[in-house]
Image (spheres, rainbow, N blue to C red):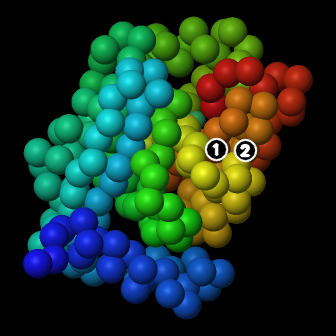
Amino acid sequence: MINRRNLISLGSAALSTGLVGAPAAAWSKAFVGHEPRALALHNLHTGEHISVTYFQGGKYLHTALSKVNHFLRDFRTGQVHQIQPGLLDVLHQLSAKLETGQPFQVISGYRSPKTNARLARSGSGVAHHSLHMQGKAIDIRAPGIELSDLRDAAKGLGRGGVGYYPGSDFVHVDIGPVRHWELEAHADHGEG
Ligand SMILES: [Zn+2]
């Protein structure tokens, strides 16, 4: 008997074979399909874990997306905001590319305007118009994966912004315009 987890692993393995290092367009094209897409995340601030199939049968699953929205809420205020499914697709692709069986650890998902303004004022390198406020950005690390490898894999997807924060041990990934940056060590003690 083949359970869903095995099916997803097989799908990921098949997709990643021969595609690591391929041009971003080829990589993205491989995901325009009906294969189920799943995600496993561990929220370091709340201690919560989530493991969901959020896309199946050619469509995003509303209940699963709602669970993810709640999981990635602003933990400081409790506010829940829609997380763009495209961001989940980036994480799903990253997971397949890295072939990590471990959940991503989440440092920051949605940030309310109030929380973002507070962090921006504190000089922790947070942008005033952060994509975290639109549910289009996430700060993560991947257990067992070098932070620089996570950064390179994210950049290799060619899907959006990638910020490297070695001092705080996370990579910022968003689905805004494609761009890359690294935060200077001296200012690097917060959330990007
Ligand atoms: Zn960030």
Q: Quadrant of the C terminus?
A: top right
Q: Is residue 62 left or right of residue 144?
A: left
Residue beneath the point at 41% across and 37% down: 42
Q: Disc 2 beta carbon < 8 A from ligand 1?
A: no
Give, as a three-letter code, the residue at label 2. Answer: Tyr
The answer to whether residue 66 is seen in the rendering is yes
Q: Position of residue 32 (x, y in %)?
A: 33, 79
Residue 73 lies in what quarter of the image?
Answer: top left
For marks 1 and 2 on the same chain, the one whose residue lies earlier in the sequence: 2
Q: Disc 1 beta carbon < 8 A from ligand 1?
A: no
Q: Is residue 137 left or right of residue 162?
A: left
Residues at badges 1 and 2 in contact (C-beta under 8 Å)? yes
Q: Position of residue 60 (x, y in %)?
A: 18, 59
Q: Position of residue 91 (x, y in %)?
A: 45, 56
Crowd rating for badge 2 (residues with CA inside 10 Å; few <14, some 14–19, many 20+):
many
The answer to whether residue 179 is seen in the rendering is no
Q: Nearer the viewer, residue 31 or 112?
A: 31
Per the image, the residue denoted by label 2 is 164
- Residue 122 drawn above or below residue 100: above
Per the image, the residue denoted by label 1 is 171
SS of the residue under disc 1: strand
